[in-house]
């Protein structure tokens, strides 16, 4: 493919690169009291990008086809036809093979992202599913297991460019998700949880704790009532913390910083969060669901500290945004479905602190343990203001007293970062983003 790209891109007087992804997936679902076993599905995605001398780029994509020369020719022609309509970008020249020199070695074995024990023929899956159902059946008060799913997949990715660079990567991943129903005094409560992992053994290890936590939260929310209103300390559950990190992650893209879509412009070196806060993106985290040796431009991935003890100290770069700042790419290029790269996260997490999660609750005399915010994805990161419906537990005397909902949580996402005064030690990845339990000094709790 690299030879084909080199020859055809040269004739077209442009740079071209190509992504090919082949994924095999399978799932076992429990719904309405029975298992539904899905066969192995095979999907192929191809995206091709062309970049001309003016830095204009355009791309084309196809699905369900093989990367045959006729297919690639069609994609290249489609991308070339779109180039005149794209905006010029002086920082988007084609990378040459010289730009890849001096990169660190990447050992596939150290990443531990492929597990040969994943059995796409289902194998031991029903036994694990029945074990999970048995654990839930022993939990008093649960009305129903609404749904449960085990899923796994193996994905092979190839990146090739007309400058001669070729990268190959294979990774496996699996997940467990569950939705539970509890009833108290005629009120129905539905709540879900889950976990993902590169390795089958890790998912089996995580399953009991994930099910126990999901059941505990579902039962605790049944019969929930409105909390006292006012300004209180708030302890944030790790599952909600992951969602909040997902909201914050794009603000660290150097491209968004350049365009003024991030609050961090011209603020490197400033204190932007509480001193217990360190945010890290690590593309080489062992066993990480976002780990890979290469990013989507073929550059080596790495570990980036973005906030260190509350101080803003870095951004995430792809090749073009790095050139604009006179920097080197951090290996964080992520391609959208159309094959256009921009900076994105790999394994993005809030570093663990020293406090146990239980101590964060015990040290809070009166406050809120927050497990969910409705509409979190609607928060505008440019300003950061939010007022969202919440659910969780009321803390009284350092203990979780009762379930609460039908209340609002108001504040500003960036003020929230500054107000974090304690971080728990319970960091565990259930996806490519992770956060331990954290405590915020105060948020406004309203009706």
Image (tube, helix red, strand yellow):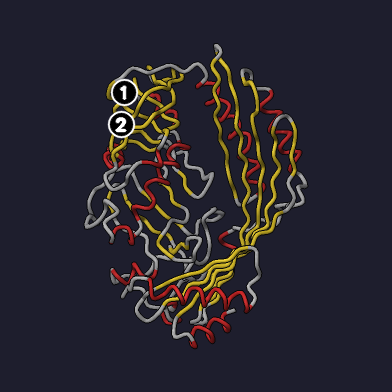
Q: Residues within 10 Å of mark 2 (few under 14, many from 20)?
A: some
Q: Quadrant of the N terminus?
A: bottom right
Disc 1 element: strand
Q: Nearer the viewer, residue 190 or 124?
A: 190
Q: Residue furthest top?
A: 185
* Residue 410: mark in rendering: 2
Give the residue displayed 37% in from the left and 77% down from the top: 93
Q: Is residue 427 left or right of residue 441?
A: right
Looking at the image, is 4 positioned above or below residue 367? below
**Residue at the (58%, 70%) spot, across then down:** 158
Q: Quadrant of the C terminus?
A: top left
Tag count in the figure? 2
Residue 107 circle label: none
Can I make out residue 266 in this image? yes
Q: Residue at x 39, y 21 (%)?
A: 395
Horizontal and vertical percent position of residue 255? 33, 61
- Identify the residue under disc 1: 446
Is the residue under label 1 in contact with that under label 2 (CB below 8 Å)? Answer: yes
Front residue (pair 158, 17): 17
Decide: few, some or many residues near mark 1? Use Cα within 10 Å; few <14, some 14-19, many ≥20. some
Q: Looking at the image, which is closer to me, 331 or 356?
A: 331
């Amino acid at each position: 493919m690299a030879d084909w790209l080199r020859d055809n891109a040269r004739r077209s007087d442009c740079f071209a690169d190509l992504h090919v992804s082949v994924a095999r997936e399978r799932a076992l679902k429990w719904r309405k009291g029975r298992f539904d076993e899905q066969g192995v599905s095979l999907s192929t995605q191809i995206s091709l990008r062309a970049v001309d001398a003016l830095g204009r780029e355009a791309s084309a994509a196809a699905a369900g086809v093989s990367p045959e020369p006729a297919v690639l020719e069609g994609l290249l022609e489609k991308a070339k036809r779109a180039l005149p309509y794209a905006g010029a970008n002086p920082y988007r020249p084609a990378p040459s093979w010289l730009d890849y020199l001096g990169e660190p070695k990447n050992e596939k074995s150290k990443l531990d992202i492929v597990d040969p024990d994943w059995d796409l023929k289902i194998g031991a899956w029903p036994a694990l599913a029945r074990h999970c159902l048995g654990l839930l059946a022993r939990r008093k008060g649960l009305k129903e297991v609404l749904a449960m799913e085990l899923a796994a997949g193996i994905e092979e990715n190839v990146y090739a460019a007309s400058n001669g660079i070729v990268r190959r990567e294979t990774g496996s991943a699996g997940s467990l998700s569950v939705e539970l129903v509890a009833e108290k005094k005629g009120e129905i409560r539905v709540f879900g949880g889950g976990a993902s992992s590169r390795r089958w053994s890790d998912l089996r290890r995580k399953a009991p704790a994930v099910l126990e936590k999901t059941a505990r939260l579902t039962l605790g929310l049944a019969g929930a009532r409105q909390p006292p209103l006012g300004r209180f300390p708030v302890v944030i559950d790790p599952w909600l913390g992951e969602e909040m990190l997902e909201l914050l992650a794009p603000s660290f893209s150097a491209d968004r910083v350049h365009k003024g879509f991030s609050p961090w412009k011209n603020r490197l070196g400033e204190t932007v969060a509480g001193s217990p806060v360190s945010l890290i993106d690590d593309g080489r985290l062992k066993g990480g669901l976002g780990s890979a040796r290469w990013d989507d431009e073929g550059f080596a991935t790495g570990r980036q500290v973005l906030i260190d003890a509350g101080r803003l100290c870095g951004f995430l770069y792809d090749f073009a945004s790095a050139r604009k700042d006179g920097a080197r790419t951090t290996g964080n290029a992520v391609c959208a479905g159309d094959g256009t790269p921009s900076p994105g996260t790999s394994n993005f997490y809030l570093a663990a602190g020293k406090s146990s999660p239980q101590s964060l609750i015990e040290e809070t005399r009166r406050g809120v343990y927050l497990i969910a915010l409705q509409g979190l994805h609607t928060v505008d990161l440019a300003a950061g203001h939010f007022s969202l419906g919440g659910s969780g537990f009321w803390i009284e005397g350092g203990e979780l007293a009762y379930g609460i909902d039908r209340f609002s949580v108001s504040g500003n996402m960036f003020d929230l970062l500054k107000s974090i005064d304690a971080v728990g030690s319970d960091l565990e990845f259930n996806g490519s983003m992770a956060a331990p339990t954290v405590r915020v000094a105060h948020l406004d709790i309203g009706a």
